[in-house]
Image (cartoon, helix red, strand yellow):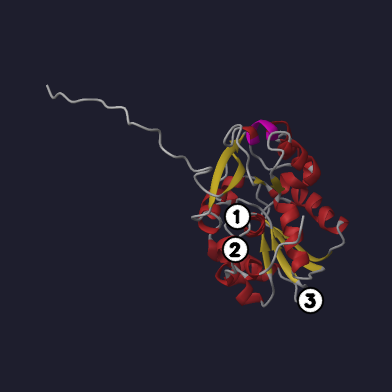
């Protein structure tokens, strides 16, 4: 039998304040296939760490099921690096942010992470559309008409003129994640009204961020998607001002002050 000495080092190692300079926390639906992949591709880097937690969710995608996530938001946020501060926390559900409310989501997350900036896909999308100066918008959602109606009301309440609103009629976010990128581009072309200023593609499950630049080239207008908008917001709030036009025009713009 091999013998050896176990030796305690003569000193303790020096510790960095943090493993990475900035921390982005993600609150993700239990059924989400897309957000983590998009954020690893667009946000995570040598300065910014992305840390996720899952929140209970059950399909179908209805206003009632979306609203049912609200009581779990605080406990979900608390599980992301417990007792350590985060720079940004993003709740990754666009339709739930509408029915729960941006302010209510922020309050629930801040109860666990009081020093963090809070990002929702809806508020980030609004910031993105305003950064483009867009007032007349086209909207594409994967949802049913029932689930899309509150979103239409949300944008109208904030002063946007919806020129065209297209719904794909799906009610399971796992199916939304399986819409192929080519199909997203095809539907985006159809959903864009010629007289709109920009196109918004809703849903964090939909893989639209990966083809945003391709859609912009096809329609000749700015494109804002749920995950592109939240990634943009999280990067800018972490001080990363790098322009990345290959991801879409939004990634060349500054983020408004909170």
Residue 243, given in percent of the width and then of the height, sits at: 60, 69
Question: Residue at the spot x=64%, y=36% of the render?
Answer: 77
Q: Closest to the observer: 41 or 70?
A: 41
Residues at marks 3 and 2 touching, judged by CB atoms closer than 8 Å? no
Question: Which residue matches tag 2?
Answer: 184
Q: Secondary structure at mark 2?
A: helix
Q: Secondary structure at mark 1?
A: loop
The residue that disc 3 covers is: 195
- Asked if marks 3 and 1 touch (Cβ < 8 Å), the reply is no
* Magenta residues, start to end: 73-77
Which residue is depicted at the point 55% across and 47% down? 50
* 3D distance between C-alphas at marks 3 and 2: 21 Å
Evaluate if marks 2 and 1 touch, with contact meaning CB atoms under 8 Å apart: yes
C-alpha gap between disc 2 and disc 1: 8 Å
Q: Position of residue 63 (x, y in %)?
A: 75, 41
Q: Which residue is mark 1?
A: 206
Tell me which label, 3 or 2, sits earlier in the chain.
2
């Amino acid at each position: 039998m091999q013998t050896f000495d176990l030796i305690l080092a003569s000193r303790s190692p020096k510790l960095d304040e943090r493993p990475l300079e900035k921390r982005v926390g993600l609150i993700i639906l239990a059924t989400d296939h897309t957000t983590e992949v998009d954020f690893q591709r667009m946000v995570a880097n040598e300065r910014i760490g992305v840390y996720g937690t899952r929140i209970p969710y059950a399909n179908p995608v209805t206003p009632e099921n979306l609203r049912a996530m609200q009581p779990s938001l605080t406990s979900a946020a608390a599980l992301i690096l417990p007792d350590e501060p985060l720079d940004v926390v993003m709740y990754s559900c666009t339709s739930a942010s509408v029915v729960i409310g941006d302010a209510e989501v922020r309050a629930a997350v801040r109860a666990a992470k009081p020093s963090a900036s809070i990002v929702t896909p809806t508020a980030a999308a609004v910031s993105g559309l305003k950064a483009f100066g867009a007032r007349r918008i086209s909207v594409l959602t994967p949802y049913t008409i029932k689930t899309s109606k509150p979103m239409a009301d949300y944008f109208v309440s904030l002063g946007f003129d919806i020129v065209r609103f297209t719904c794909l009629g799906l009610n399971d976010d796992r199916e939304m994640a399986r819409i192929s990128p080519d199909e997203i581009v095809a539907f985006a072309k159809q959903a864009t009204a010629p007289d709109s200023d920009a196109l918004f593609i809703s849903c964090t499950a939909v893989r639209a961020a990966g083809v945003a630049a391709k859609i912009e080239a096809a329609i000749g207008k700015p494109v804002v998607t749920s995950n592109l908008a939240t990634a943009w917001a999280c990067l800018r709030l972490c001080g990363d001002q790098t322009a990345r036009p290959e991801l879409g025009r939004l990634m060349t713009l500054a983020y408004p002050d909170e």
